[in-house]
Image (tube, helix red, strand yellow):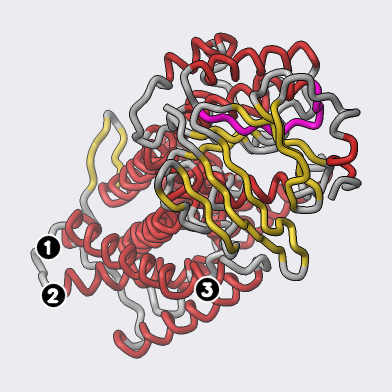
Amino acid sequence: MIGTLVEILFQGLTLGGLYGMIGAGLALSYGILKVVQLAHGEFITLGAFLAVGAVALVPWLPLPAALAAAFVGCAALGVVTQAMAVERAMSFRDPVVPMLVTFGLSIILRNGLVETVGADLRGLDIGGLAQARIEIGTLSVGLLPLVSLLISLAAFAGLGTLIFRTRLGREIRAVSDRPDIAAMMGIRVTQVHLIVAGLSAGLAAVAGVLLAMRASVSPFSGVGHLLIAFEVVVLGGLGSIRGVLLAGFLLGMTQVISARIDPNAGLLYVHLVFFAALVWRALRGGLR
Amino acid sequence: MGARLEIANLTAAYGEFRALSSLSLTVEAGETLALVGANGAGKSTLMRVLTGLMGGWSGAVTVGDAALVPGNPRAASAQGIALVPEGRLLFDSLTVEENLLIGQSGRAGAWDIPAILRLFPVLAEKRKARPSTLSGGQQQMVAIGRALASNPSILLCDEISLGLSPLVVDEVYAALARVRSEGVTLVIVDQDISRVAARADRVACLFKGRITHVGPAAGVTPAKLHDAYFGAAA
């Protein structure tokens, strides 16, 4: 009994960490750039395929290197798309403009992926890691979910440290609060935007790699990821890093528990919990 | 040290509306200028031009011996201009201390963080607090501290006493007197003409984007400025 509970808890935390990662980049984009990044799901998918491609190219490539390749690739694309399109769209007062631009970007990325890798499902071949288990006391846990959870936690810890403990993080928060006053303090606002866009896409890539480690992804997976990302970000309190991780844990736990009770439910209970949380917040006057 | 600010034939417009027209004004290095005028006279527009928040103006603005780059807040900051904006406009995602730290632009000078905390001792115990949890007066102190942290040669203060109690205003002006004694050039905008004139070397009055009066501050009262303030002299 205790063993089952601990297993559910562990699975919930692992999936929750993944959900948190899926939301992290979007939270950054929305919280700091105030851009609803609709291509976020595609950045996640692209990250997965970059890792898959890197491992296909170099079969002995260790996981950290594949992860780094996906992060760097996506971050670079995030910076380029921000510089070429999103940044200009942000200069309009109407927030719909950048949203439309990122929507267009998502279509381009999705079709670009179909064009280059085909429409097939792919998973990340991680060799023996998928089956390996380690014993902690009397408990036996899969090494893969443990690694996945640790990567999520490390990514969140790194993000939190960057935003709240460094000079760059201070500048990022200042730019988010008042870009014009921040510029008056000598901060390069556009440069900060580019860094945040790159970071957001890079975090999406990490989520993509974690996804590809446990299941297959296709170029069309992006929309589903975006939906989860939205739920996590809205639930976590629009732009709060800690909130995103906690919301991820809540939704992950919900899915693992509901799957035990009703194996065919899929994400139904996840969406229901999200909806219930929104209703609860609305009743308390927390929605504006 | 303070820098000389020279504004010549400055014209700035928001679309069709001319907020400043052919404005010329010189503030000597280390001088304190009180800038007064009714709402909409162009005081805040002048602040926006000087801090680089507004571009697209014509005329010439010289800071020290270098021309001001229009519409470039970073350049204005590098040239030694700092603003205490109307309404404070602090960064609320940052703590009080971080607000001060972010003001540091790398220019060397007397105003490091300990010096600012000595100027406003009350902020020392609020270092980790969010600005929104502070009183209006304390917020104004953070705004002044943030501007001072860049070690400006010209400090602009927009609506310095707006919404503050008289006691707090005295405290703020006492701090500005200390800043002045360091030789910083000060331009202070305040609705209370007598109060700001009593602390300035000269008074300039704006009306509809033009300077309608410039003169020594000694003895200036609202009555004496009446015509300049309401445009009868223009």
* Pointer 1 and pointer 3 on the same chain: yes
Q: Position of residue B59 (x, y in %)?
A: 57, 60
- Magenta stretch holds residue A271: no
* Pointer 1 and pointer 2 on the same chain: yes
Kindly tell me whether residue B200 is visible in this rendering. yes
Kindly indicate whether the residue at mark 2 contacts the one at mark 3 (C-beta within 8 angstroms): no
Circle 3: residue type: Thr
Circle 2: residue type: Leu
Q: Position of residue B30 (x, y in %)?
A: 51, 27
Mark 2, residues whose alpha carbon is within 10 Å: few (<14), some, or many (≥20)? few
Residue on which the image places disc 2: A57
Residue A56 horizontal side relative to residue A79, left or right: left
Write the residue at 53% across / 33% down: B28
Element class at badge 2? helix
* Pointer 3 and pointer 2 on the same chain: yes
Kindly indicate whether the residue at mark 2 contacts the one at mark 1 (C-beta within 8 angstroms): yes
Circle 1: residue type: Leu
Task: Give me the chain letter of mark 2.
Answer: A
C-alpha separation, residue under disc 3 versus residue under disc 2? 30 Å
C-alpha separation, residue under disc 1 versus residue under disc 3? 32 Å
Task: Give me the chain letter of mark 3.
Answer: A
Residue on which the image places disc 3: A102
Chain part drawn in magenta: B185-194
Task: Give me the chain letter of mark 1.
Answer: A
Q: Is residue A126 above or below residue B190?
A: below
Residue A80 horizontal side relative to residue A263, left or right: left
